[in-house]
Image: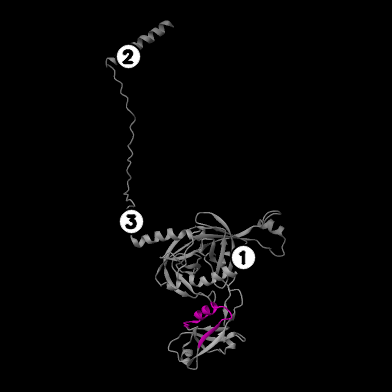
Amino acid sequence: MRRSVALLVIVAVVAVAVWATGVITVHVNPPKTELVSASPFWQEKGGEAPLPPTMRIWVDLAKATRPAAVNVSTTQRVRGRGPLPEDFFRRFFGGPRDGEPPRGRQSLGSGVIASADGYIVTNGHVVADADEIVVRLSDHSEHKAKVVGVDARTDVALLKIEAANLPALPFGDSDKLEVGEPVMAIGNPFGLEQTVTTGIVSAKERFIGSGPYDDFIQTDASINPGNSGGPLVDTRGTLIGINTAIFSQTGGSVGIGFAIPVNLAKDVLRQLKDRGEVVRGYLGVSVMPVTPEARQAAKLEESRGALVAETVPGSPAASAGIKPGDIIVAFQGETIGNPHDLTRRVAGTPPGTKVALRVARNGRETPVAVTLGRLKDAPAAPPSGAER
């Protein structure tokens, strides 16, 4: 054992001596690796250059108006299912068991903050038959909302949430809109909150057959299911329309959307806030566009006014002597351009008001005084909404 240890020591000493004299050289080389370039293979360009002013306006407009756009979600509890027992639906359709809360249908829409103290404007069909309404703000906070009032004839609804210092969107003047003017729509299409789309005013005073108060702004800004009730704003950052309906054969946007003009909604919202309902004047006539034959018989230089097709017996119009074939050409001193113009003016006048009409008959215009009645609260079918 001692000889083995001594031998190992001698070998080690000899090896060190040989290495020290340089007879044996040891080279340690690290493994070869490919160097990775820190620079990209693509060309980069920073965002220092400002956007052109015509493009920058959309960025600034979105920043200023998006906080006022909200999401409106509703829940409608499942009602009774008729004579079949609930146990049947539990077994075959997965209905709620005993003691479970009833399931409900949910839908999504949009809205716009009208005042800092929590008044929200949306469409009537967004909140129709809802048992619970939740408004989600741009800061992601959620608030339960109550319905202040709904006007089915114009499809306008007013909600209220308990909140303060909200970013309200100022109301503009939709009468001053021009065809071709750029606009921006904000809403909650398909549940994608705070979505912004842009376009132009394609047309004004569109009649789409939803009721006698049709007066829609047509726009090609993309409006899809979930946009209903959201704001349509102009380049001044003001609300000029409430997105309401789309024309589509597929259910998606095809560039034809409709918005309620804010000027039409203003009087409706005042009444909804004050009394929870809208009271309208009533004349009692059925009107139609002026035909060439009627214009010739009345000796009018142009086809303007509203041709009376029928007078309701016992109505204010009948009591004032208005008859079928008459053409109403003025209301309270303002020219009537078409039947919808007359309908809107009568509806916007309080019942009991004595108004002055001018009626063209037998080749001359005759003044007629009429005291308006109150339009009955018959429900009107709302337009097909973009949230459906």
On screen, residue 289 versus residue 380, left or right, reads left
The amino acid type, in three-letter code, at marker 1 is Asp
Toward the bottom, the furthest residue is 362
Earlier sequence position, callout 3 versus callout 2 = 2
115 vs 48: above or below: below
Q: Is residue 336 magenta?
A: yes
Q: Residue at x 30, y 16 (%)?
A: 19
Toward the top, the furthest residue is 2
Q: Which residues are magenta?
A: 334-358
Earlier sequence position, callout 1 versus callout 2 = 2
Residue 51 occupies which quadrant of the picture? bottom left
Q: Secondary structure at mark 3?
A: loop
Mark 1 = which residue?
129
Q: Residue at x 42, y 73 (%)?
A: 176
Q: Residue at x 56, y 66 (%)?
A: 158
The amino acid type, in three-letter code, at marker 2 is Val
Front residue of this view, candidates 289 and 326: 326
Mark 3 = which residue?
50
Q: Is residue 261 visible?
A: no
How far across and how far down the image is residue 57, in percent? 38, 61
201 vs 333: above or below: above
Front residue of this view, candidates 25 and 348: 348
Mark 2 = which residue?
16
How far across and how far down the image is residue 369, in percent? 54, 87
Foreground: disc 3 or disc 2: 3
